[in-house]
Amino acid sequence: MAKIVDARGLSCPQPVILTRQAIDEGEFPIEVLVDTVTSRENVRRAAERAGLKVQVEAMGDEFKLTLTR
Amino acid sequence: MSERLTRFFASRWGILLAGAVIGLLAPLLQRAGNPPNMGVCVACFVRDTAGALGLHRVATVQYIRPEIIAFVLGSLIAALLFREFKPRAGSAPIIRFFLGMFAITGALTFLGCPWRALLRLAGGDLNGLVGTAGLVAGIALGVFFLKRGYSLGRSRPAPAAVGWMMPLFMVGLLLFLLFRPQFTKDGPIFFSAQGPGAMHAPLLISLAAGLVIGFLAQRTRFCTMGAWRDVILMGDTHLLTGVGALFGVALATNLVLGQFKLGFAAQPVAHSNHLWNFLGMALAGLAFTLAGGCPGRQLFLSGEGDGDAALFVLGMLFGAGFAHNFALTGVPDKLAEGVLTVGGPGPYGQAAVLIGLVFCIVLGFTMCERQK
């Protein structure tokens, strides 16, 4: 069961803060939901900096990023 | 193709390009007629626009700045082309309005937004260092609140009209600028005959430069507050690369154009009252952090459909009028017959900055969204 971070509608930099908290908890995979390309790129960058693999899936106007080790 | 471009703009080269282009265009706009060390300044230009509309009546700072209009429209064009135009709203709009008001009160105490702090420094005005130090201190305090769980809550997708309001308002301003209607005998639209408001590049040059900056900044998420925030919060220097490029290129361009004059005292449209330069920008930095973007970024967001950022922009416009009507802004240094009078804010301006800081700190402690 993936851990889900719902960061839709949140201003910068909260999606990244929530993602980093989830990463620190150490349970993978993590699914991050965002609704802007800005947040998608910010979360992707933060996850890649943490050495994680990132898979992005477009869901209508929103995105789901799946972070795995 | 579109996705590859998006990845390029999101890369370090993309943000470097955006910063470098702003750093090049700002001194060139100054060369073309904009005020000294103010090739581009979001706070000053919003203030001038407020003056042109008669929201304040200081005759020397009244002009509908095409750059502001073009920032929003350039961002709109980029967002439409790349399918990122997304009407959204509902994240504590009234709070954002007041954050905009206090942010510009702080910025006008210093006499510049974070962009101008860099441009002033790039023109040799060392007060830019003090202002930037204040900005970073304010952002650091904002990061403290973010780490505690500060949040203005979620925005939600909204009907198209919400996203189009700010771009349409800008089109209205453009029509006022082009046709300069006079609404009453001594009334608006006002255009300064002298002072900084009378100094401006030709309309088409300002518009073109603004459109390029708006387009690039929307694509790259250029943000002078986010730059420092990301470094303090997580050691991420991505956005700071853009800020560095802006400063470096502006400095080089100023040196080539002979627009560089080193010192603290009597710099153009600036004062050397260190305490209030620092505190003014600390207030601005804190307010930008709590609102999620520097004034430029708020304009770009409002162009891509963010109705909450639009409220911040209107708060700045309203706040700029308020700041001049109530004599809150910093007064420039004066140099007469070799005697230097150090400027800065008067007692009301000092009180306004302190009230703004208290307002932001109370928000920082009280606005928290419960996380599941």
Image (spheres, rainbow, N blue to C red):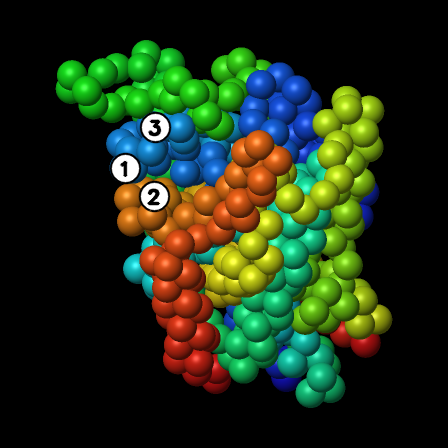
Q: Is residue B137 left or right of residue B301?
A: right
In the image, is residue B52 above or below residue B327? above
**Mark in front: 1 vs 2:** 2
**Residue A51 rendering spot, x and y as whole percentages:** 84, 71
Using a 10 Å C-alpha cutoff, classify the residue at mark 2 as few (fewer than 14 neighbours), some (14 to 19) or many (20 or more): many
Q: Chain of mark 3?
A: B
Up/down of B26 relative to B285, above or below: above
Mark 1 nearby-residue class (10 Å; few <14, some 14–19, many ≥20) = many
| B99 sits to left or right of B56 | right
The answer as to whether the residues below labels 1 and 2 share one chain is yes
Label 3–label 2 contact, CB within 8 A: no
Chain holding disc 2 = B
Which residue carries the number 3 mark? B59
User: Could you tell me the amino acid type at mark 1?
Assistant: Leu
Find residue B55 and name its label.
1
Q: Quadrant of the N terminus of chain B?
A: top right
**Snapshot quadrant of residue B232:** bottom right
- The mark nearer the N terminus, 3 or 2, is 3
Of all chains, the one bearing label 1 is B
Residue holding disc 2? B324
Q: Secondary structure at mark 1?
A: loop
